[in-house]
Image (spheres, grey):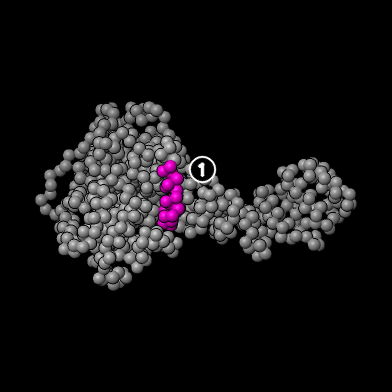
């Protein structure tokens, strides 16, 4: 190749004259065996927006004597990906992985290609390389890949790096905090929460834009701030007057109330159905026509024989929100109850399509479902006191005992598992904390550590899965002066085995500000006393509601400090623990908490009041459902 032409091409490239490079070097393209001018030509073609042609030139460069084969083929792979030629990119790139196994740029481009062709298994093989990178694009792609498998410890590494690269982006910071909670990285959580507290104190609440409503509840007990956590891009925000227009539309009311439930949790193994199943079965069919509008994952729904007992099931799989709303409207539903709210997998946006004259939020999300068009939220006087009204757009339907239903019929109630079989010491007081790790706040962690310090004869039994989460938990307690021998970890297990093992503990410790919800009622169902703290929002008042409905309001401490004192006193009073356990057993089938039929009658009364107002074209209003007479006899044959 003419050396003068190559030199001139280099000068042209330096001044951005890529067409000049092409003009000077193209005549030599077919005969050149020198890699350098081919690399120059390939770079010029890439700058001209011709990635496919550039990739072919880089392939030729790699075949030249003395060429940097790996560098040229790496460039060819990247350019073929850019050109959309995945077959060629993968053919070259996969071979190159053997030579460059840790090259993050190669991993990045191959991962892009494999995602495009749907080879998810191969994509996940490349995440480890991407996680080692410091490049923002590489890390963003790794984050996207890991978004569906956040139990992978690499997620913590990736989102930690992204948070450091984008300190002012609320979405990136939130994502890191969310993953840190999943892996119990309390050092990271403390740093992030302190930064948010400084912003909040200065009046800057912009960080809340990146946080989901559910995640905000895990650490914030302020209902005013809970409403500002607005990261929910799937929602179409209703316009002013939307709700009133929906309620005023023509509707054919029937003799029986056409009641619809909307959820993805209609299968027996889900925690929601451990609460709700018997209530659905107890509905008065002479007064209520029940339809379940279901987007439950098909692999859960397909083999569940119990579903046929709950009402007519109408699937919404494969339907857009508008199509799903049209299906519901064709059923002339009088009152539609959304069981998800701002929780994972929710399709609450369906309610923003003017679906039913009465729309209600219940059970799934413990708070106001901002930007979801609901007339009412179902609660009780504890979780929804009058002071909370200013922070809700929904009106309150207050049930007389507890907002949470509980199934006493289908719920497993096995004999207790022996402590020895669970690896628990026979001579120590066992505190049990079986809430998900993400619910363990810094405040709860501090109080638990204080309890363990003051109860030398105790251990804390926790349901924490995964080596990284357990290591982080040990480090967090170690920082607070609690030795590793005071902690015992349990893994997730089947529900029957879980209820059996809970009975081996002495006392349950609640989390706050986000209480145990189903977790608390599971402990109480198993006969295990639970102590909690009075809360300041719905999520932090749930255990108080449940304990009150079981006749044990004294187990709710007024402050976190009183919570510590109560735990210490009970740990040193085995007689009182035994008495509390006996009281739970006596109350289990007498008090309202597990009385599904009684609960159903109260719920139906509340729904009837809503429908009566809807028929009369009256706007929603707060109301309380009166309590039925107290039962004189147990309600279950299990007693």
| Left or right position of 144 against 83 | left
Magenta part of the chain = 178-198
Of 178 and 593, which appears nearest the observer? 178
Of 620 and 481, which appears nearest the observer? 481
Residue 617: % across, % down: 28, 27
Residue 437: % across, % down: 38, 56
Residue shown at the point (32%, 36%) measured from the top left: 392
| Left or right position of 8 against 320 | right
To which quarter of the image does residue 604 belong? top left
Residue 463: % across, % down: 35, 61
Residue farthest to the left? 632
Residue farthest to the bottom? 420
Please name the predominant secondary structure of the magenta segment in the image: helix
Secondary structure found at label 1: loop
Residue 250: % across, % down: 33, 28
| Quadrant containing the C terminus in the rendered view | bottom left
Residue 194 falls within the magenta-colored stretch: yes
Name the residue carrying label 1. Answer: 169
Residue 234 falls within the magenta-colored stretch: no
Residue shown at the point (85%, 50%) measured from the top left: 6
Residue shown at the point (77%, 42%) measured from the top left: 16
């Amino acid at each position: 190749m003419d050396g003068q032409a190559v030199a001139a091409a280099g000068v042209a490239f330096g001044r951005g004259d890529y067409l000049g490079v092409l003009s000077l070097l193209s005549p030599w393209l077919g005969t050149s065996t020198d890699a350098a001018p081919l690399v120059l030509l390939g770079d010029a073609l890439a700058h001209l927006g011709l990635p496919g042609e550039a990739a072919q030139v880089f392939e030729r460069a790699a075949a030249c004597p003395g060429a940097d084969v790996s560098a040229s083929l790496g460039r060819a792979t990247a350019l073929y990906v850019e050109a959309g030629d995945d077959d060629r990119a993968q053919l070259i790139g996969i071979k190159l992985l053997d030579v460059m196994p840790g090259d993050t740029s190669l991993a990045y481009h191959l991962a892009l290609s494999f995602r495009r062709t749907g080879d998810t298994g191969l994509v996940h093989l490349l995440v480890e390389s991407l996680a080692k990178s410091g490049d923002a694009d590489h890390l963003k792609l790794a984050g996207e890949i890991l978004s569906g498998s956040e139990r992978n410890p690499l997620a913590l590494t990736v989102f930690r790096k992204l948070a450091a690269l984008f300190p002012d982006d609320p979405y990136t910071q939130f994502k890191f905090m969310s993953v840190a909670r999943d892996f119990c990285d309390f050092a990271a959580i403390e740093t992030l929460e302190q930064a948010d507290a400084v912003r909040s104190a200065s009046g800057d609440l912009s960080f809340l834009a990146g946080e989901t409503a559910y995640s905000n509840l895990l650490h914030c007990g302020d209902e005013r701030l809970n409403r500002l956590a607005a990261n929910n891009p799937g929602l179409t925000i209703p316009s002013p007057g939307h709700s009133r227009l929906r309620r005023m539309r023509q509707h054919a009311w029937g003799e029986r109330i056409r009641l619809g439930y909307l959820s993805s949790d209609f299968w027996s193994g889900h925690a929601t159905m451990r609460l709700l199943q018997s209530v659905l079965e107890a509905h008065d069919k002479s007064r209520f026509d029940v339809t379940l509008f279901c987007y439950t994952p098909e692999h859960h729904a397909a083999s569940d024989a119990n579903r046929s007992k709950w009402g007519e099931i109408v699937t919404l799989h494969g339907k857009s929100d508008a199509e799903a709303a049209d299906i519901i409207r064709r059923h002339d539903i009088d009152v539609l109850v959304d069981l998800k709210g701002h929780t994972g997998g929710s399709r609450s946006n369906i309610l923003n399509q003017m679906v039913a004259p009465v729309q209600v939020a219940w059970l799934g999300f413990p708070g106001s479902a901002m930007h979801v068009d609901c007339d009412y939220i179902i609660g009780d006087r504890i979780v929804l006191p009058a002071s909370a009204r200013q922070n809700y757009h929904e009106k309150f339907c207050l049930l007389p005992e507890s907002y949470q239903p509980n199934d006493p019929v289908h719920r497993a109630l096995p004999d207790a598992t022996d402590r020895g079989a669970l690896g628990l010491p026979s001579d120590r007081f066992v505190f049990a904390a079986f809430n998900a790790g993400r619910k363990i706040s810094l405040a709860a962690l501090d109080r638990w550590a204080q309890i363990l310090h003051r109860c030398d004869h105790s251990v804390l039994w926790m349901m924490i899965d995964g080596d990284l989460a357990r290591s982080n938990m040990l480090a967090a307690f170690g920082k607070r002066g609690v030795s590793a021998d005071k902690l015992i970890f349990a893994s997730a297990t089947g529900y029957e085995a879980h209820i059996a093992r809970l009975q081996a503990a002495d006392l349950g410790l609640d989390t706050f500000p986000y209480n145990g919800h189903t977790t608390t009622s599971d402990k109480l169902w198993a006969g295990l006393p639970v102590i909690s703290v009075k809360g300041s929002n719905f999520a932090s008042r749930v255990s108080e509601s449940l304990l009150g409905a079981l006749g044990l309001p004294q187990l709710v401490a007024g402050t976190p400090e009183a919570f510590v004192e109560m735990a210490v006193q009970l740990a040193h009073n085995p007689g009182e623990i035994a008495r509390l356990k006996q009281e739970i057993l006596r109350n289990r089938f007498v008090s309202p908490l597990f009385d599904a039929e009684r609960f159903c009658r109260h719920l139906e009364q509340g729904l009837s009041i809503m429908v009566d107002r809807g028929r009369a074209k009256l706007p929603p209003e707060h109301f309380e459902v009166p309590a039925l007479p107290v039962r004189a006899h147990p309600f279950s044959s299990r007693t």
